[in-house]
Image: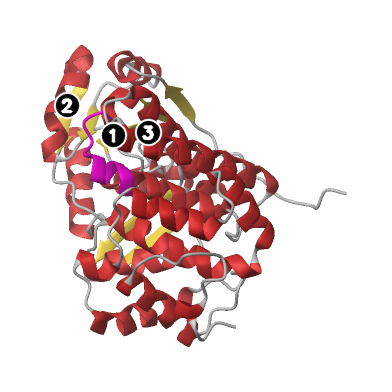
Amino acid sequence: MREQFTYDALPGRVVFGAGAARTAIADEVARLDATRVLLIAMEQEEPLARKLTEPFAERIAATFTAVRPHVPTGVAEDARDLATAAGADLLLSIGGGSTTGTAKAVALTTGLPIVAVPTTYAGSEVTPVWGMTKGARKTTGVDQRVLPHCVVYDPDLTLTLPVDLSMASGLNAMAHCVEAFWAPRRNPISTLVAEEGIRALGRGLPAVLDEPAGVGGRADLLYGAYLAGSAFAVAGSGLHHKICHALGGAFDLPHAQTHAIVLPHVLAFNAPAAPDATRRIAQALGRADAVAGLAELTRQLGIPSGLRELGMHESQVDEVTDLVAPGVPADNPRRVDRPALRALIHAAWAGPPPHGSDATSTHQGQT
């Protein structure tokens, strides 16, 4: 008999396909009857954004390019002020997760609709999750107002994304999928979506590594990122994201690389207590062992072996442990006491990733 579950299907429109951005963005802006669009793009992606919006340039009321990682509150306030001054009736974000996050910060207080055009594999464009950083602390929340009304996925826009960033960004999406197996609001539907996301990402990552300009591999990554974000949006965040958000907020570590490094360690920690999830993750990866398979994939893709390579100091491990400990999910597959949490974070700092499902030696103290 099927167990009871609750599944909240989120509203939103997706347009997917190579070359879609050249035609679909204008159609989506028109469909929403927008006449005063606030264009949001990082400074280095502004030329691309300008080119894509040429067919409806007269509708661009203002452009915001002061996008920063982790969306500092000052940046959010500046973007909101510009939206008000321009009389914006639509937010158009063209870029990666930080660009989407900036649009969400504006929508959170204004209620303006968002059309998102991702150029990386963040997946945040299909979630109602927002995040902002004040000082050294990152705050996240869930609000339906920040969920984009439409997302235009175009693999062509990711062809020039550097390979190293593509690998880290794809593994960031993989983290959404893996976490969805034991996140607080998990259900059979979100798990199926996550499993297919892992399968697509597992195909796409090596393909892009071998042929960065190949549209097929890029399409698999973008499709996987969409599925990853969709699963994460419904299932919610767990231990992995609590750790990564603390690391990003406290030390401004690069978002995608941080997720890519931490993921194998959290999987190794939880795997012994989540055998069914671990089996399905392994099958989706096409590997005999989920932990060993993911660890080998990260090495194959050239991911830094530990957080120390991103500039984090060993002396900061305790600080991160203190930040994460109060927010550890009560229903994590394994109980997480402070010694276990510190051991996990220290292992991610030191590297390399664990070698198999029995790789618990680096996580002493877990119970």
Can residue 142 be seen at all in this image of the molecule? no
Residue drawn at (45%, 78%) of the image: 362
Q: Nearer the viewer, mark 3 or mark 1?
A: 3
Q: Quadrant of residue 333?
A: bottom right
**Magenta stretch, residue numbers:** 159-168
Which is more N-terminal, label 1 or label 3? 1
Residue that badge 3 annotates: 207
CB contact under 8 Å: marks 2 and 1 = yes
- Disc 3, disc 1: CB below 8 Å? no
Residue at left 31%, top 34%?
Answer: 210
> Does dot 2 land on a helix, a strand or a loop?
helix
Q: Position of residue 363 (x, y in %)?
A: 48, 79
Picture coordinates of residue 367 (x, y %)?
Answer: 60, 83
Relative to 93, does residue 236 appear above or below in the rendering? Answer: below
Q: Which residue is mark 1?
A: 119
Label 2, on which residue? 48
Residue 71 location in percent, x, y? 25, 54
Residue 125 appearing in the image = yes
